[in-house]
Image (spheres, rainbow, N blue to C red):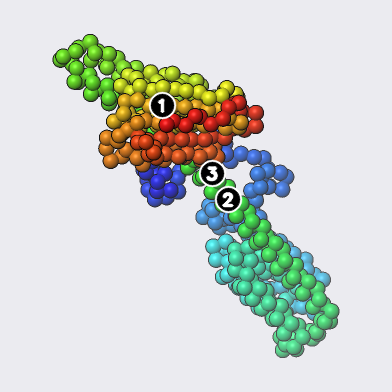
């Protein structure tokens, strides 16, 4: 990643050291809006869970879940009133204290997203006091279920299980041992078979909460994987743009630099030759601006077809002409017949040859180079040779240019070798695979002596 940052100019301002910022089109829709359709249950067609199910809505916005808590409070209050009408003989009537306990059991659920442990133990404690006071059974258990559900989904499984176990144990103690000492008077112990229903209720709550917790973890993992994939695509696109700009600018600026030196040297002694050098500079800069504009247009309008076709091996004569203007004599040989070559492989082959010739101009004392292009079954073979010797410490080609050539070849599943030749000089050899049907009819390029 650090190498990529160095090649692309570092992080954007305000994003130093962080993950690469994604372009708007990498987030799904125009302007970064999420695409997809909702089903009748609130699920996104791309697999995103509804926020009301995962409990992330309250946390993501920083607001308390007022609407769902008020609705739950209404259900608990009305349901308890209705349940009390059928339990007038063995339960205490709902008085002000009972209403306060019900209200407290629901009110503590307001913080269930921010403090799930406090919420589940608070509503469980209110429910235990409610049962111990002899009030009628009813929807107070629904508040406990919501608190347990929220705690399990948030990852506090032990706290949720402990709170529910506390309510169950308290119910057993009150209903079968302490009922004579607690209100109302004349209360009797319920049948033990009723505890099976309570146990089933507890198991159902925990099972449902665990199911949602597992699904939420799966959704989170899928979302993280999508974000990583988007970051990888953004990195790859940024690196591709960096390679394109490097190859375009390095070649053109090298030609301009050489011709500028020629023009300065001949300005007084041979004005006509200096004029020719300046003309070459003008042409090279114009072509470089055109290619840079094409790359930037692609960056600004992703998904649109480029206005000009990408360069390929059919433009080798232009490379030869540019190299000749820089004082380099290039001979080009072809082995085999050219078949159908995909644009990506054609562009990569062109850029590899271009960068290799640029390195000859910049780092080699030789004024001649040989380019061999071979079309074989399912592959393109390239070989670029110069006789040397190197003119500086970077003659081995260890800079970004050679790294860019390797990245281009690797992106297509190909290979590239670069190093000194046995008889002196430098050689770049590349092999790029082609898909089925994109092949020529020849062997490897002939070896140079």
Q: Position of residue 264 (x, y in %)?
A: 19, 20
Report if residue 278 is visible in the image: yes
Callout 1–callout 3 Cβ contact below 8 Å: no
In the picture as drawn, the residue positioned furthest to the left comes out as: 268
Which residue is disc 2 drawn over? 225
Name the secondary structure under disc 3: helix
In the picture as drawn, the residue positioned furthest to the top comes out as: 272
Report if residue 282 is visible in the image: no
Q: Quadrant of residue 81?
A: bottom right
The circle on residue 147 is: none
Q: Position of residue 44 (x, y in %)?
A: 66, 45
The circle on residue 230 is: 3
Which residue is disc 1 drawn over? 370
Name the secondary structure under disc 2: helix
* Image side of residue 143 versus residue 390, left or right: right
Mark toward the start of the polypeptide (1 vs 3): 3
**Residue name at image x 51 percent, y 29 percent:** 445
**Residue name at image x 24 percent, y 13 percent:** 273
Mark toward the start of the polypeptide (3 vs 2): 2
- Is 221 placed above or below 382 here? below
User: Which quarter of the rendering shows the C terminus?
Assistant: top left
Q: Position of residue 31 (x, y in %)?
A: 52, 35
**Residue name at image x 58 percent, y 70 percent:** 117
How far apart, in angstroms, are the residues tagged by discs 3 and 2?
9 Å
Foreground of the two, 95 or 83: 83
Mark toward the start of the polypeptide (1 vs 2): 2
**Crowd class of label 1 (few under 14; some 14 to 19; many from 20; radius 10 Å):** some
């Amino acid at each position: 990643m650090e190498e990529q940052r160095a090649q692309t100019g570092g992080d954007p301002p305000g994003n130093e050291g962080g993950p690469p910022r994604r372009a708007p089109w990498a987030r799904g829709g125009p302007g970064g809006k999420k695409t997809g359709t909702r089903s009748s249950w609130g699920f996104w067609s791309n697999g995103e869970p509804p926020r009301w199910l995962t409990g992330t809505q309250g946390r993501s916005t920083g607001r308390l879940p007022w609407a769902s808590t008020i609705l739950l409070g209404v259900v608990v209050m009305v349901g308890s009133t209705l349940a009390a009408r059928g339990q007038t003989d063995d339960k205490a009537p709902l008085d002000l204290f009972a209403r306060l306990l019900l209200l407290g059991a629901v009110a503590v659920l307001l913080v269930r997203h921010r403090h799930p442990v406090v919420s589940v133990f608070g509503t469980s404690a209110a429910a235990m006091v409610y049962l111990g006071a002899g009030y009628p059974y009813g929807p107070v258990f629904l508040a406990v279920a919501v608190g347990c559900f929220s705690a399990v989904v948030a990852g506090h499984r032990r706290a949720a299980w402990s709170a529910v176990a506390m309510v169950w144990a308290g119910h057993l103690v009150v209903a079968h041992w302490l009922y004579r000492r607690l209100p109302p008077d004349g209360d009797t112990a319920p049948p033990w078979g009723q505890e099976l229903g309570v146990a089933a209720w507890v198991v159902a709550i925990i099972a449902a909460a665990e199911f949602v917790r597992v699904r939420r973890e799966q959704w989170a993992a899928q979302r993280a994987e999508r974000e990583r994939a988007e970051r990888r695509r953004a990195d790859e696109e940024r690196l591709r743009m960096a390679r394109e700009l490097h190859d375009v600018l390095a070649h053109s600026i090298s030609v301009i630099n050489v011709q500028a030196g020629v023009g300065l040297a001949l300005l007084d002694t041979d004005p006509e030759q200096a004029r020719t050098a300046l003309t070459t500079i003008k042409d090279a800069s114009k072509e470089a601006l055109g290619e840079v504009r094409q790359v930037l247009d692609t960056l600004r309008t992703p998904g649109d077809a480029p206005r000009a076709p990408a360069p390929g091996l059919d433009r080798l004569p232009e490379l030869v002409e540019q190299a000749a203007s820089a004082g380099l004599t290039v001979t080009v040989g072809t082995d085999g017949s050219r078949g159908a070559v995909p644009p990506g492989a054609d562009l990569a082959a062109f850029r590899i040859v271009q960068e290799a010739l640029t390195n000859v101009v910049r780092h080699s004392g030789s004024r001649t180079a040989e380019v061999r292009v071979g079309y074989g079954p399912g592959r393109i073979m390239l070989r670029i040779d110069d006789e040397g010797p190197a003119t500086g410490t970077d003659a081995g080609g260890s800079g970004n240019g050679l790294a860019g050539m390797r990245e281009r070849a690797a992106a297509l599943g190909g290979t590239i070798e670069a190093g000194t030749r046995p008889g002196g000089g430098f050689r770049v050899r590349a092999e790029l695979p082609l898909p089925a049907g994109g092949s020529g009819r020849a062997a490897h390029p002939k070896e140079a002596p």
